[in-house]
Amino acid sequence: MPDFLSWCQWLESTPMSATLRDSLWLFPAIETVHLFGIVALVGSTSILDLRLMGFTLAGTPVPKLARRVLPWAWLGFGIQAATGFFLFAAEASRVYLNPAFRFKMLMLVAAGLNALLFHVMTSRSAAQWEGRSTTPMSAKIAGLSSLALWFAIVIAGRMIAYFE
């Protein structure tokens, strides 16, 4: 995608990107906020995923738990998106070509599709299966998939620094 690579080269040449790269404290500060976003996003989704898989909070209805934790997930996602853009902008060309970054973006799309499928197909019937002792297999698969995808995203994000 040469057009996107050209955009990346332009982005990293902007004064904002130069400031991010050249500042002794700004890039690490943004990375730190990015980590707080990871905690909010992955922590809250993990609670829901573990509930879906039947490992915790069996007495808490999934819709009630979702109402409690999903606002934290959305907050974390917003923090991730904003800080991720700034981290990307500082070294856009290098990061865009990085296989770990590409894998991370692919896993983000997969996590989004997994969440969409869960909400469209499975969670609508949550009230019907709340009285049962176990959650349906589709909910367990969605929870396991989500947990695996978010952990893959975190690992891939960390691996960006180790690939050229």
Image (cartoon, rainbow, N blue to C red):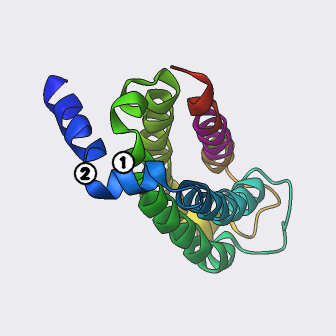
**Marks 2 and 1, Cα distance to the nearest angstrom?**
9 Å
Q: Position of residue 155 (x, y in %)?
A: 66, 35
128 or 119, nearer to the observer = 119
Q: Which residue is under mark 2?
A: 14
Say left or right for 130 vs 6: right
Q: Residue at x 58, y 71 (%)?
A: 70
Q: Residue furthest left?
A: 3
Asked where in the image residue 152 lies, by quadrant, the reply is top right
Residue 82 seen in the current view? yes
Other-residue count near label 2 (Cα within 10 Å), few / some / many at <14 / 14–19 / ≥20: few
Cβ atoms at labels 2 and 1 below 8 Å apart? yes
Specify the principal SS of the magenta part: helix
Q: Residue at x 26, y 38 (%)?
A: 8
Asked where in the image residue 37 lies, by quadrant, the reply is bottom right
Residue 149 part of the magenta-drawn span: yes
Q: Secondary structure at mark 1?
A: helix
Q: Which residue is under mark 1?
A: 89
Amino acid type, callout 2? Thr
146 or 3, nearer to the observer = 3
Say left or right for 41 vs 84: right
9 or 125, nearer to the observer = 9
In the depicted structure, whether residue 2 falls above or below residue 157: above
Say left or right for 76 vs 56: left
Q: Position of residue 29 (x, y in %)?
A: 60, 62
Q: Position of residue 88 (x, y in %)?
A: 41, 45
Residue 124 seen in the current view? no
Q: Position of residue 82 (x, y in %)?
A: 42, 63
Say left or right for 33 vs 112: right
Q: Which residues are magenta?
A: 145-157
